[in-house]
Amino acid sequence: MATAFEKDVRSKQWHPFKPANYRVVLQALIKYRGADVRFLEWGSATGVITIMADLLGYEAYGIELDASLVETARELAQRNQSKARFAAGSFLPTGYLWEPEGGDGRLGTIGEGTAGYDELGIDMQEFDVVFGFPWDGETDMMLDLMAKRGGTEARLLVNMTNRGIYEYRGGKRQV
Ligand SMILES: C[S@@+](CC[C@H](N)C(=O)[O-])C[C@H]1O[C@@H](n2cnc3c(N)ncnc32)[C@H](O)[C@@H]1O
């Protein structure tokens, strides 16, 4: 059955938004929840993951480039009595540049825009758990961003499609 997003948005215009497997993400979120744990979703789309994080007890935020998706996320949060907050903007902080050693710094499906952190009033390094769903080839950029701008103790949860969620801390994969 088509979801409301597929009916209302995707049927009218193409959008590079592909949802994660929410059940798998939920398990990872349960693992790290706790009092005063601040969560950030990079590219929060319709807000489902950020809202799940809020309902699990995280202080949860999402940043999404597409303002219409941010509106949808805010409505979904309201309908579910969630305090999750969303900013319309980029999860790439001001001044961040992706400069891989191989030389090809193209961002793929990751778009650019005004950084969303100012709207939230929270710096990237103040988040304890960050979640991202990169498309193929974009994981290295997310690891680089986390290493350069993330908190030293922060965890990065990367959705690897069929391989589940990979966890990184201090630039190293946790197994
Ligand atoms: C693959 S979808 C993932 C959606 C959601 N996080 C999930 O896992 O279900 C990627 C989302 O990131 C958004 N996006 C792409 N570049 C972005 C950027 N620089 N800042 C914020 N959002 C971005 C896209 O608009 C899209 O909604």
Image: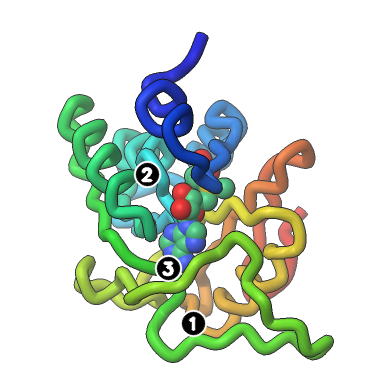
Residue 147: quarter of image: bottom right
Q: Nearer the viewer, mark 2 or mark 3?
A: 3
User: What residue does disc 1 label?
Assistant: 149
Q: Is residue 36 or residue 136 the one in the foreground?
A: 136
Tell me the amino acid under the disc marked 2: Thr
Chosen colour scheme: rainbow
User: What residue does disc 3 label?
Assistant: 91
Is the residue marked by circle 3 packed among few (<14), some (14-19), or many (20+) residues within 10 Å? many
- Residue 96 image offset from top left, x and y in percent: 49, 86
Secondary element at image label 2: helix
- Residue 5 image offset from top left, x and y in percent: 40, 28
Secondary element at image label 3: loop
CA gap, disc 3 to disc 1?
11 Å
User: What residue does disc 2 label?
Assistant: 50
Q: Is residue 20 or residue 38 the one in the foreground?
A: 20
The residue drawn where x is 39% and y is 68% is 90
- Mark 1 and mark 2 lie on one chain; the one further toward the N terminus is 2
- The answer to whether residue 129 is visible is no
Tell me the amino acid under the disc marked 1: Arg
Q: Is residue 148 or residue 71 the one in the foreground?
A: 71
